[in-house]
Amino acid sequence: MAQPLHHYVLPLLLLALSFKATSTSTHNSHGLKSLHFTLYQQEAINKTVYLIVKGVTGPDVSPSASPFGSLFVNQDLLTISPNSSSKVVGVAEGVAITSSLDGLTNIVMEKITLELKHYKGSVSVLGTAHNIEVFDLPVVGGTGDFMFVQGYIKPSLVTFENPNIVYKIEFHLYWPSYVANHFSHSDRSSTLNGV
Ligand SMILES: *[C@@H]1O[C@H](CO)[C@@H](O)[C@H](O)[C@H]1NC(C)=O
Ligand SMILES: *[C@@H]1O[C@H](CO)[C@@H](O)[C@H](O)[C@H]1NC(C)=O
């Protein structure tokens, strides 16, 4: 039976891989602080992601579409390279609900807990993912070192070797200036190699 790739399917995107996780952090002259890095989400069908409820109408569950109302839940590890044996620095817990009748889009809610070298906490993501087109998911907030954070994540498919799926997740995080000034992170270098 064909399997759903649930919320991050991007069959058209087999992007050039960056095997070295790097992050950059900057303060601009207005005090806006930002952090940019890439991680890899390791997902396994029926192990870290499940179809909990099959939707009511529309296409059958397939790699690119699922019935309207289908509910998927995942708890995936985030690693620093596409290799699932590489260092784990985060966990993504999420829900995706098929929200268009053609079965191509899903409402996605995700809490991503991160333990990076200089930043610990979580970011929350809420948005709509399209199964074929490129999309960004807005970051709506965070906890710990990511308190008040804004920005977006950009997921793309790296490999799908049933049942294992690897997504590349680009993080683009921005702190409002009133929060950036509050942080006493002046000891942090402007470029961090290795998350
Ligand atoms: C993944 O990492 C493990 C452990 O470091 C290594 O043995 C394995 O060869 C790697 N796999 C690939 C496909 O690079
Ligand atoms: C996952 O579980 C469903 C329901 O038991 C089953 O139909 C499907 O074949 C399984 N898929 C994989 C890849 O294990």
Image: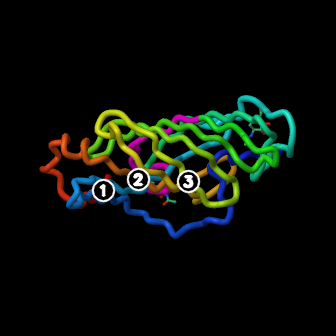
Can you identify the residue that label 2 sits on? Answer: 80
Q: Position of residue 130 (x, y in %)?
A: 67, 53
Q: Position of residue 51 (x, y in %)?
A: 71, 34
- The extreme bottom residue here reads 16
- Number of marks drawn: 3
User: Mark 2 is on which residue type?
Assistant: Ile
Identify the residue at image location x=34%, y=39%: 148
Identify the residue at image location x=42%, y=50%: 151
Quadrant where the N terminus lies? top right
Q: Which mark is residue 167?
A: 3
- If the picture is divided into quarters, which one holds ligand 2? top right
Identify the residue at image location x=54%, y=47%: 42
Dot 1: element: loop
Q: Is residue 15 magenta?
A: no
Dot 2: element: loop
Left or right: residue 181 compared with residue 63: left
- The extreme left residue here reads 187
Can you identify the residue that label 1 sits on? Answer: 194
Q: Position of residue 138 (x, y in %)?
A: 50, 47
**Which segment is the magenta one?**
81-94
| Label whose residue precedes the other's in the sequence (1 or 3) | 3
